[in-house]
Image (spheres, rainbow, N blue to C red):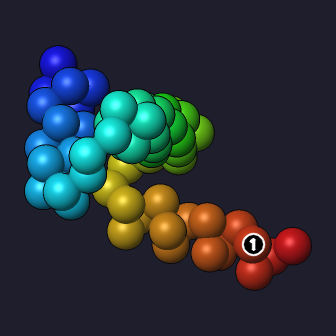
Amino acid sequence: MIMGVIVPIALFFLLRLTTMSELFTVFATTFLAWTVADLWSTILEKPRLKDRSPGQAFREDWERRSKE
């Protein structure tokens, strides 16, 4: 609700936009940014870190890559 409605309307008024086409552009841009961020978070989710700390996973990956 907040990201989909309130943020675009707030941007519309803060940027002092005036036409409906500008409002719809802000809505579309906000929706697109939110969708891309959600997609990236899904892609970058690292299930390989399960039961390991990020430092431990980094060291293990570094060692594995150095052996290749």
Residue 32 in the image: state x and y as whole percent. Answer: 50, 37
Residue 44 in the image: state x and y as whole percent. Answer: 53, 46
Residue shown at the point (13%, 31%) measured from the top left: 6
Residue shown at the point (26%, 26%) measured from the top left: 4
Q: Tell me, yes or no, if residue 67 can be seen here.
A: yes
- Residue 60 falls in which quadrant of the image? bottom right
The residue carrying pointer 1 sits among few (fewer than 14), some (14 to 19) or many (20 or more) residues within 10 Å by Cα, namely: few
Residue 56 in the image: state x and y as whole percent. Answer: 41, 64
Question: SS at mark 1?
Answer: helix
Query: Type of residue at label 1?
Result: Arg
Q: Nearer the viewer, residue 52 or 47?
A: 47
Asked if residue 8 is positioned above or below residue 58 in the image, the reply reads above
Asked if residue 38 is positioned above or below residue 55 in the image, the reply reads above
Q: Nearer the viewer, residue 11 or 35?
A: 11
Asked if residue 43 lies left or right of residue 16, the reply is right
Asked if residue 60 is positioned above or below residue 2 in the image, the reply reads below
Per the image, the residue denoted by label 1 is: 65
* Residue sitting at the far top: 1
* Residue sitting at the far bottom: 66
Asked if residue 68 lies left or right of residue 10, the reply is right
Name the image quarter holding the C terminus. bottom right
Name the image quarter holding the N terminus. top left
Residue shown at the point (26%, 46%) measured from the top left: 18
